[in-house]
Image (spheres, helix red, strand yellow):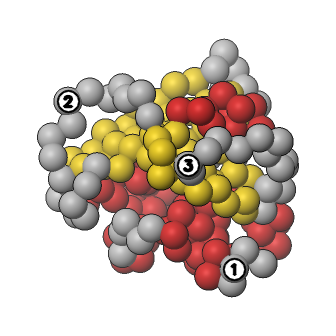
């Protein structure tokens, strides 16, 4: 990786926004990149809004704050509406097409709808929708090798949730397959 990538990840509390952000940041650190995860919670944890900023860079990161993200992952419509204009030209927006279709799309960005809730339900657990979205992003921009993602997932889930590791890995792969199949 030879350039800085700034992510804004946003959705309702309980959608795995923070885990997804932590996973990207830890994966960056695992491959010797500088990485920063900066969470922001709404007044309620589960059901309220949550977002995080993640920066992964080969260069030192001077601030957790940035004006434009390279990637917006919007797991719900309020998050899309809030952050859509804060994506850099040439950036990527991934949105949860299980919940909404955008009414207006910023110019000069690439946008991908991924039915992450539907795919996660097919896998048997709605709580892995965030990992489906990660897989979709990695299919578009292979920032990390599969082994890095699997290893970091194992570390973050820990022994208490190790039974969820295989399902989370399968969810990442399902997101990749969705994009590889042309979004079908």
Q: Residue at the spot x=21%, y=37% of the render? A: 61
- How many neighbours does mark 3 have within 10 angstroms: few (below 14), some (14-19), or many (20 or more)? few
Label at residue 81: none
Residue 97: x percent and y percent? 79, 56
Q: Please give the residue where the numbered disc 2 appears in the rendered image.
A: 62
Say which of marks 1 and 3 sits in front: 3
Identify the mark nearer the N-term, 2 or 1: 2
Q: Position of residue 20 (x, y in %)?
A: 52, 50
When the figure is inspected, residue 25 is found, relative to residue 36, above or below; the finding is: below
Give residue 14's position: percent from left, percent from top. Answer: 69, 40
- Asked whether the beta carbons under mark 2 and mark 1 sit within 8 Å of each other, the answer is no
- Quadrant of the frame with the N terminus: bottom left
x and y, in percent, of residue 63 in the image: 26, 27
The image shows a total of numbered marks equal to: 3
Helix, strand or loop at mark 2: loop
| Res. 151 visible in picture | no
Q: Nearer the viewer, mark 3 or mark 2?
A: 3
| 121, 88: nearer the viewer | 88
Q: Secondary structure at mark 1?
A: loop
Q: Given this view, does label 2 or label 1 mark the residue nearer the observer?
A: 1
Quadrant in which residue 54 is drawn: top left
Q: Is residue 72 visible?
A: yes
- Rendered position, 143 above or below 17: below
| Relative to 35, residue 97 above or below | below
User: Could you tell me how far apart the alpha carbons at marks 3 and 2 are, in whole angstroms?
Assistant: 27 Å
Task: Look at mark 3 in the image and give the residue it sits on.
Answer: 108
Spatial distance from mark 1 to mark 3, Cα to Cα? 21 Å
Read off the residue under disc 1: 182
């Amino acid at each position: 990786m030879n350039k800085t990538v700034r992510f804004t990840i946003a959705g309702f509390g309980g959608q795995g926004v923070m885990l997804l952000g932590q996973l990207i940041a830890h994966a960056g650190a695992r491959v010797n990149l500088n990485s920063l995860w900066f969470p922001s919670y709404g007044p309620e944890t589960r059901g309220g809004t949550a977002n995080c900023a993640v920066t992964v860079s080969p260069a030192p990161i001077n601030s957790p704050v940035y004006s434009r993200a390279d990637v917006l992952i919007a797991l719900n419509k309020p998050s899309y509406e809030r952050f859509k204009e804060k994506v850099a030209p040439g950036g990527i927006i991934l949105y949860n097409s299980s919940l909404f279709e955008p009414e207006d799309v910023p110019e000069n960005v690439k946008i991908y709808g991924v039915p992450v809730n539907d795919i996660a339900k097919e896998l048997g657990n709605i709580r892995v929708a965030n990992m489906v979205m990660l897989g979709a992003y990695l299919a578009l921009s292979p920032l990390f090798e599969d082994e890095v993602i699997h290893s970091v997932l194992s570390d973050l889930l820990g022994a208490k949730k190790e039974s969820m590791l295989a399902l989370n890995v399968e969810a990442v792969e399902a997101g990749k397959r969705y994009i590889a199949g042309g979004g079908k």
